[in-house]
Amino acid sequence: MTEATLRVESLQTHFFTKAGIVKAVDDVSFSVARGKILGLVGESGSGKTVTGFSIMGLVDPPGRIVGGRILFNGQDIVGLSEDRIREIRGNRIAMIFQDPMMTLNPVLKVETQMVEAIRAHADIDRLTARNRARDALGQVGIPSPEERLDAYPHQFSGGMRQRVAIAIALLNKPDLIVADEPTTALDVTIQGQILYEIQKLARETKTALIWITHDLSVVASLADEICVMYAGRIVERGSVDEVLDRPAHPYTAGLIGSVPSRNAKGTPLVQIPGVMPSLLNLPSGCAFRQRCARADDACAAAAPEPVGARRQVRCIHPLTEVA
Amino acid sequence: MSGTPIIELRGVSKRFVKHLDAAARFAAKLGVNVREEIVRAVDGVDLAVRQGEVVGLVGESGCGKSTLGRIVAGILPQSEGEVRYRGKTQAERSASERARAALAIQMIFQDPYASLNPRMRVADIVGEAPLYHGLVDKAGAEAYVDETMRQVGLDPGFKRRYPHQFSGGQRQRIGIARALAVQPEFVVCDESVAALDVSIQAQILNLFIELRSRLNLTYLFISHDLGVVRHLSDRVVIMYLGRIVEEGPADALFDKPNHPYTVALLGEIPRLDTRKRVFAPVKGEIPSPLNPPTGCHFHPRCPHVMARCRIEAPALREIAAGRKSACHLNEAQ
Ligand SMILES: Nc1ncnc2c1ncn2[C@@H]1O[C@H](COP(=O)(O)OP(=O)(O)OP(=O)(O)O)[C@@H](O)[C@H]1O
Ligand SMILES: Nc1ncnc2c1ncn2[C@@H]1O[C@H](COP(=O)(O)OP(=O)(O)OP(=O)(O)O)[C@@H](O)[C@H]1O
Ligand code: SF4
Ligand code: SF4
Ligand SMILES: [Mg+2]
Ligand SMILES: [Mg+2]
């Protein structure tokens, strides 16, 4: 088997706050092979972004990676010097942030930002770089890209800013892209255009992708594999068909049941009862148990360990057997 | 339903003009072809929303939804046209009436991070305005904040935190809590559930529905998620490049879209049961609000384009009871 582009092993990222330790990511493992797309879905606040930040070396104090390894092309990148990390970031690994203004500088024209991103890693003249930037804007469906290069971020619509950030991440054809809710504010046609470019990149340059999203229908049509996160852990993992057609974890099944198109119009939408427990003080045993219809005493006794190999679930009473 | 609409727009337009800087002005004097760039973000929109109604606003990214939403919410002045709230424009009100009207219409912003003050704690972000406007007294303020946070699925235990200490979806809910805390009559929701997983999305949408039936709240609901729009809206308005191209009752419009753009849009809805779909690039050039196509804005992409469409912009006309569409095809028959 060829080496995966990214292999995350037992990653733990915690925030040491005054109120206590927030275990935002706690024992997370997965891998993405070259040219493959992994969908990372899960409840709001479950640790998806922090997982992405950990890979990018962007966790700021009071947060810290307290355990595990992140192997990028076989090399552990946890604890690398800031210089080395910066070299990898923006060249070999790129992140599309949930908030596009994390990528964009509000006081610089889009052209300046894109040209600098290109020239930081390639020895080409300004004009060639500008032309490449213009084409990149066109690829993500920005009309009049030539004129738009001269605009500032605030002169773009929300979805256009998101697309500029995507264009910047694609510029240097990295080995790995961590895309955090990249198409949340995009209509279906533009979304289709972006997904077309993403598929092309994965196919042609073998870029591996982690696609963080809450939109199950996008993962369904795009991803090869899905990881479902809940309260800092991956609770279910498998191929798209396995997870969406035969969910094993009760949380995954609840997510699928909440999709609006599966609910009759006007009726209240099915929601998973209760709320995710605070990561500051998780209940004993399974973190989902206060919301789970299948919970019993065994679920309170100990946190379920992952069962299975490639296809995995963390549940004592799964809806389907995975082993 | 009859009576005065709660919000009424007449001929509303918004143009953003990019003025030439000194160098460009100089170049223009020398005869170089530079000119002022004008973005017609909103172009002659008429819209009425009745009390208690949920109107969904849908359209391609960049077509002017947020701009229209901000005009409705009174935080962006229109370049042309009139905005009436309960029959009156803001200019026709006294100062105190104006302030009350401004409070009654709230907006939940598309970009939650930029709209939250990074140096304020959540308790203040949510609790300051209701206290200031006397909706709660000092003694009740804390409990009020807790209750509002709980309603949107945020743990009140986190109210001493700053916005950057929350996840993306949690921040979005802070924006929702802040808007609802001042007990508005009309809420403009701009992609308000876009960053939320479906279960929390369901909780928020159920809250919107409940507030509507309990308090007769009215919503302008901007979203690209057609499943959500259909589920929630009574009426749907479709925008294309600054103009309304179709509007009608949600079910009728989704079941039998009239405008060719609406037809194209509905055909693209991604579904849970499409797997490993091969995506195709957008066909034809995406038109630009900097340089909109002549006649019908949709003509370069329309499969039914006729000679007339390139010259004459179709008017938004009634095509059936409660339904309007702006397409020349409707007159051909
Ligand atoms: N700086 C911080 N200090 C304390 N807690 C934090 C900090 N940053 C994040 N957290 C907490 O860590 C948890 C995981 O956050 P993360 O941003 O990874 O969630 P997410 O899965 O990306 O959610 P969403 O879908 O809402 O974006 C959240 O509960 C959040 O409140
Ligand atoms: N302050 C501004 N200055 C110049 N142009 C602007 C400004 N704000 C918006 N625009 C332009 O107006 C048009 C409409 O923008 P708007 O934000 O209303 O779109 P939208 O429909 O909300 O799109 P999205 O779905 O991407 O959020 C866009 O072309 C945008 O670039
Ligand atoms: S371990 Fe128990 S509580 Fe947790 S998801 Fe499985 S059945 Fe539910
Ligand atoms: S007016 Fe003409 S171009 Fe426009 S939507 Fe109708 S048929 Fe198509
Ligand atoms: Mg996130
Ligand atoms: Mg917008």
Image (spheres, rainbow, N blue to C red):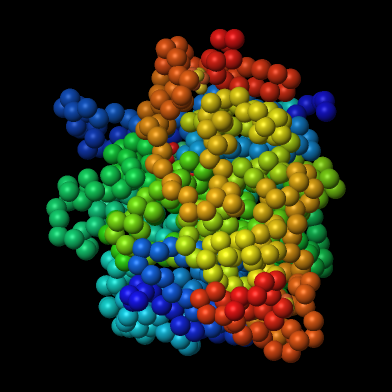
* Residue B148: quadrant of the picture: bottom right
The residue that appears at 53% across and 26% down in the rendered structure is B260
**Up/down of A254 relative to B290, above or below:** below
With A50 as the anchor, is B150 left or right in this view?
Answer: right
Q: Name the quadrant where ligand 3 sits.
A: bottom right
The residue that appears at 62% across and 37% down in the rendered structure is B57
The residue that appears at 39% across and 54% down in the rendered structure is A198
* Residue A230: quadrant of the picture: bottom right
Give whichever of A257, A173 is nearer the camera.
A257
Give whichever of A259, A15 is nearer the camera.
A259
The x and y percentages for residue B184 are 74, 47
The x and y percentages for residue B100 are 73, 42
The x and y percentages for residue B216 are 82, 42
Can residue B138 be seen at all in this image of the molecule? Answer: no
Extreme right residue here? Answer: B214
For the C terminus of chain B, give its image quadrant.
top right
**Up/down of B40 relative to B308, above or below:** below
Give whichever of A202, A56 is nearer the camera.
A202
